[in-house]
């Protein structure tokens, strides 16, 4: 863990570029530090001033007679390096470099930025920026930024790669009453990045939720490590804009073509338990939900409403969001029936009717919250004549006290009439919306996070015996010596064997006699295929013969294939003919791997065969840390899973063997980063075991 | 068309149940009529009063010495029938029955409601309700409801099946400044329904957008007729809650099982050009967009921003919503390059940078709006120090004037700092949001509607020669006489022939000799299948033999099938053996039909074969009014389409023949409502023509 204490809770701060002249950025920052109520020591640094705002000014940080924890630097780019050097000599622990004009302006700026990073390294300083708005911690408190807005104190940490976005959100947060524990502008991320601040916020007792706006992730593996750990401590919600350059376009494999450009981020976030928001609205709705509401024990939602229509809309939404409408205990239903008017709906959604005053809401809410089958509650209110918004809100707040484990959300559908109640609810920390949909969406986010918390930690590497890394290395050595990047079928079959992946036997024959010998060794029937890395579509050039039953057929096929290939592609280098044992037909699957720039190997699983790219029935996971449990989830996401479980009366396929094989493929591609792409298509799944038929591996 | 003038623009209104006593619903309604500024004559009806609020009261409507256009009835349910009778005698044109206590309270209420409808019919009166809040027209103006809120005058008609929802929305509308042309509470829809008011609003010059909240549709075919016409005049946006009872659960066919319970509504809305909102927020966002902005000519969006991050988010959203980022003309790019700072992004999204004041925004906006490749524009603003929200808003409003055909939307990301500008923008009629996503979603709605408007009207029945209805009737007659609901293969093949659907020849043979004779007539190879409506899975009982090449094989197969079936299912009635010509293998498709309670036959098309329910690659359309163009859209929605166009080097399949066959299937199921379900699975598609292999028809 990085210790960013000197940055978020510094005992002393120097503002380099502080000035008494309004309009200058150094002026704004210096005033912000003072006005934020910062309790530590503040040192304005300006060679031209003796004193600024009553505080003694120093010509340089190194002239400050005391320890400086953090230096906030707001001087022109050309001077930043000298200032950093001076800070380093003075023993400053961390820098926040506000100044722009680095990487973002081109190669000269990049060069400057690299030297700045090197200076920090030389002196063991950590750096935020350059090119940032700064950072704010409302609990320290400190506003070491040029943001005009000092936000309300709260429990949400917000990390933003966009400075303007951060400023916008701060301005907006005041209008909507949203509070933050800290707000960090990430800027060019030359040293510290979202990874460091996620880690810091995860350990910060004042932060309950971590929000990030990011455009890219530089160190994928470290992000995954840190974010996975953080997500088990508190919710991490990310909005990621732009699209990853990984995969897709350039990929030649099936798996590569199936992995869309943004897919790796999606998979990575899901796999490490990060919640990905699809919009800014969702990001902040979720933030409020997590900051204010407990995480429910399950996905069963109860709705209490004074109007049928909104109740139906909410019910539709519960189902659409993958949640479940709670089914009440018999006692709950009986009590509701006895005590509510006859026309009420006493099942879920509970309709207390348009003439419900607060007492009727209170009664229904009490019974519903007490029901053990209810995990969370949404209270809908329409402003009918008799509605008592304030008193009903009081009832809701009583329930929140009485049932602290069950999140309660409000959807007050109205304007002026309900505003008093809605504000009261929101102020008391119960998320309140106008329409039911965002309330249900927020519950869905909470429920999803509950699943993250409940997933036991598991060791992905456990119990994977019989792995022969040396064998694989030997094969790669031969391939490289042969100056190839595409492996032959006999080589990939051998690699599969080294990693315990059951593959149909393949042997390379260089004469008809050898082909017959191999065929007899493995047993008939066999398939013959031309072995040439240059020939992509072997069938098209007459390079494949299937269903060969006898030695004579094999001999004949060998000669015919050679004739065909020489005829079609006289220039192709031919390594010989691959003899493969013909396996009985099973359920056709694909297992593949494509490599993402940020996150490394992505494993694909789905329906195989020639229509794999048409049907696109494929799910993905990062190979890194891939556990058996996660593989099972991966299988379940596909239609292939329905087939494997036994479709239309067929016997189920060997699921355990499939999980084992996917784990072995993941181990292989994790162990050998030189594997650029891999497709096993098809894999035949049987009632007992599997067989990998056609294994393609490309190395880089 | 219904003339609802007497209801939305009555020249005189009687309020039955008007009373001077506050707290009574009749008091509220009477006051609302008066206070809404209604210019027509108002007659309070109350036998106990001589005068109410200075207006002469009458003991009954029939006692009013003048013509009464509309009577608003707010007396206890038990008295409503008498009042309606009295109104009828008095020549009242329409009734708004506010009173509850009818269908919604059970069978007695339903009885009363039926008699009320009958009374209206007897006198040629139209009725709104019963069980409604009432109706409001802000242009007449009249508030014939008990809603405390009289909304702002506007261009949105809102029809709601939920009274409480309507009251809630009115309350909310004041808070957010939303205006309505009219607001109608539909209640029990005993006579008038959303259909009538959609029709009225479509012809109302004061209405630009029609919004509906509905829970069910009673008269599907009339809804489709009216809504299709209305949607070509102005946007109709519907939020439909609850789920249809059609399809799914009870269905025995593939097609039935694939059609989800809510699917028919989805398909119906799309097919008649209705925009279906997925949430309340979307409903009203779209309403504002349509009321305020022009419909763009195309889907090319330009973004102008003063900050990179939000620009990227907006770009992501443009792509996610199926819109396109506009590519500017060279001149536009050149002018932007020459006149914006060097660090600006001059491509789309145009980043005018954080230090942009209004003049720079104005310049960029002017160029972007003038570019012929831009159909709509989103202006993003973050409150950076120098931002000029008011002046920039003025620039946007100038562009709105200068380019009236291009919708401009604002996303002002901030709070207090930007509020003045945001309010000014919204007041001037430019939709303004906090975050970019809803702006892009609204543009997507506008673009979608542009497609509705641009789809030429087409006659679904044109050019469908060679249809033999009598032939089909004759077959159904025989089936009914035989007391069956499931047709034999020989019968369905015959029906296909009658409607010009190319099917593999099938003949029913009742002896081995006859089977051989039929096989020789149609030519080898042939397939033999047991003909028995009771045997669903023919293969499982040894009831199918394929690839029969000779007379001897056919003879042998006949005997074997009979033996097998008698062995497995001795009690099954066997009609004989079907001899079917074995067709060459083509691309396997399914064409099917399931019947929806509201909207009639739904046609399905997709990938066929035994995995049809697993792959679920199926698109649906209503058979009613199904045009060739719409069938082409239907094909395009499936993965099967990719196959048909020629996948992996295969030749394309006969798309024209496919469209023709689907039109013929639609004609067949439209012509014969007794066809309950129909599956053709598989249909083989060839380079030239098609062949329907296995046609199943169930009648009811």
Image (cartoon, coloured by chain):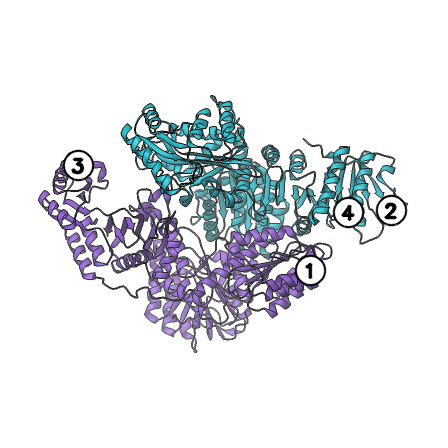
Chain colours: A purple, B cyan
**Chain letter of disc 4 in the image:** B
Determine the CA span between mark 2 and mark 4.
23 Å
Say whether disc 3 or disc 1 marks the residue closer to the N-terminus.
Answer: 1
Crowd around label 3: few <14 · some 14–19 · many ≥20 (10 Å) = few
Residue A87 seen from this side: yes
Determine the CA span between mark 2 and mark 3.
102 Å
Badges 4 and 3, same chain: no
Residue position marked by numbered label 2 in the rendering = B52
Residue position marked by numbered label 3 in the rendering = A569
Taking depth in this image into account, of B253 and A77 the one nearest to the observer is B253
Circles 2 and 3: CB atoms closer than 8 Å: no
Nearer the camera: disc 2 or disc 4 = 4
Residue B482's place in the image compared with B29, above or below, is: above
Q: Is residue B619 left or right of residue B194?
A: left
**Chain letter of disc 3 in the image:** A
Nearer the camera: disc 1 or disc 2 = 1
Circles 2 and 4: CB atoms closer than 8 Å: no
């Amino acid at each position: 863990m990085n210790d960013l204490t000197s940055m978020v809770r510094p005992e002393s701060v120097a503002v380099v570029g502080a000035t008494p002249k309004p309009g200058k950025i150094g002026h704004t920052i210096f005033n912000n530090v003072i006005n934020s109520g910062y309790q530590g020591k503040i040192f304005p640094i300006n060679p031209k001033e003796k004193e600024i705002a009553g505080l003694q000014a120093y010509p340089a940080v190194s002239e400050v007679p005391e320890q400086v924890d953090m230096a906030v630097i707001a001087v022109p780019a050309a001077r930043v390096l000298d200032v950093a050097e001076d800070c380093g000599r003075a023993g400053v622990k961390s820098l926040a470099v506000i100044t722009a004009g680095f990487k973002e302006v081109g190669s000269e700026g990049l060069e400057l930025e690299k030297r700045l990073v090197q200076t920090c390294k030389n002196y063991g300083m950590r750096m935020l920026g350059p090119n940032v708005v700064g950072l704010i911690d409302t609990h320290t408190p400190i506003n070491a930024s040029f943001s005009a807005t000092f936000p309300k104190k709260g429990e949400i940490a917000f990390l933003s790669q966009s400075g303007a976005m951060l400023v916008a959100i701060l301005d907006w947060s005041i209008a909507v009453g949203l509070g933050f524990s800290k707000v960090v502008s990430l800027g060019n991320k030359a040293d510290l990045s979202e990874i460091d601040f996620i880690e810091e916020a995860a350990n910060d007792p004042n932060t309950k939720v971590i929000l990030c706006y990011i455009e890219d992730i530089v160190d994928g593996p470290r992000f995954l490590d840190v974010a996975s750990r953080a997500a088990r401590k508190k919710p991490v919600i990310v909005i990621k804009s732009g699209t990853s350059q990984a995969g897709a376009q350039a990929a030649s494999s099936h798996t590569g073509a199936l992995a869309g450009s943004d897919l790796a981020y999606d998979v990575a976030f899901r796999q490490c338990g990060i919640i990905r928001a699809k919009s800014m609205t969702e990001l902040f709705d979720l933030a409020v939900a997590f900051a204010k509401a407990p995480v429910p024990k399950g996905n069963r939602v109860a709705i209490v409403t004074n109007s049928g229509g909104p109740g139906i809309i909410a019910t539709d939404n519960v189902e659409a969001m993958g949640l479940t409408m709670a089914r009440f205990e018999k006692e709950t239903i009986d009590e509701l029936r006895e005590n509510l008017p006859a026309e009420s709906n006493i099942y879920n959604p509970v309709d207390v009717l348009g003439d419900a005053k607060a007492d009727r809401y209170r009664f229904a809410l009490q019974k519903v919250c007490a029901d053990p089958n209810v995990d969370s509650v949404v209270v809908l209110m329409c402003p009918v004549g008799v509605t008592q918004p304030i008193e009903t809100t009081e009832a809701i707040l009583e329930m929140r006290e009485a049932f602290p484990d069950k999140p309660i959300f409000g959807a007050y559908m109205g304007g002026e009439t309900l505003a008093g109640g809605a504000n009261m609810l929101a102020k008391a920390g119960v998320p309140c919306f106008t329409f039911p949909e965002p309330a249900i969406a927020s519950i869905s986010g909470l429920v999803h996070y509950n699943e993250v918390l409940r997933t036991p930690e598991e060791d992905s590497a456990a119990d994977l015996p019989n792995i022969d890394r040396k064998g694989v290395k030997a094969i790669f050595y031969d391939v490289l010596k042969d100056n190839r990047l595409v492996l032959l079928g006999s080589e990939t079959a051998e690699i599969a064997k080294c990693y315990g992946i059951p593959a149909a036997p393949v042997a390379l024959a260089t004469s008809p006699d050898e082909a017959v010998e191999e065929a007899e060794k493995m047993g008939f029937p066999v398939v013959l295929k031309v072995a040439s890395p240059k020939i992509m579509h072997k069938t098209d050039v007459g390079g494949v013969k299937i269903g060969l039953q006898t030695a004579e057929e094999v001999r004949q096929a060998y000669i015919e294939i050679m004739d065909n290939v020489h005829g079609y592609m006289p220039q192709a280098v031919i390594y010989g003919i691959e003899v493969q044992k013909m396996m009985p037909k099973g359920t056709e699957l694909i297992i593949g791997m494509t490599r993402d720039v940020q996150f490394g190997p992505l494993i694909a699983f789905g329906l195989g065969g020639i229509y794999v790219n048409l049907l696109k029935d494929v799910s993905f996971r990062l190979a890194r840390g891939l556990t058996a449990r996660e593989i099972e989830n991966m299988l379940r996401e596909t239609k292939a899973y329905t087939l494997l479980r036994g479709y239309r009366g067929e016997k189920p396929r060997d699921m355990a063997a499939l999980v084992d094989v996917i784990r072995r493929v993941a181990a292989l591609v994790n162990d050998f980063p030189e594997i650029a792409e891999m497709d096993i298509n098809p894999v035949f799944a049987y009632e007992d075991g599997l067989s990998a038929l056609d294994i393609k591996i490309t190395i880089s």
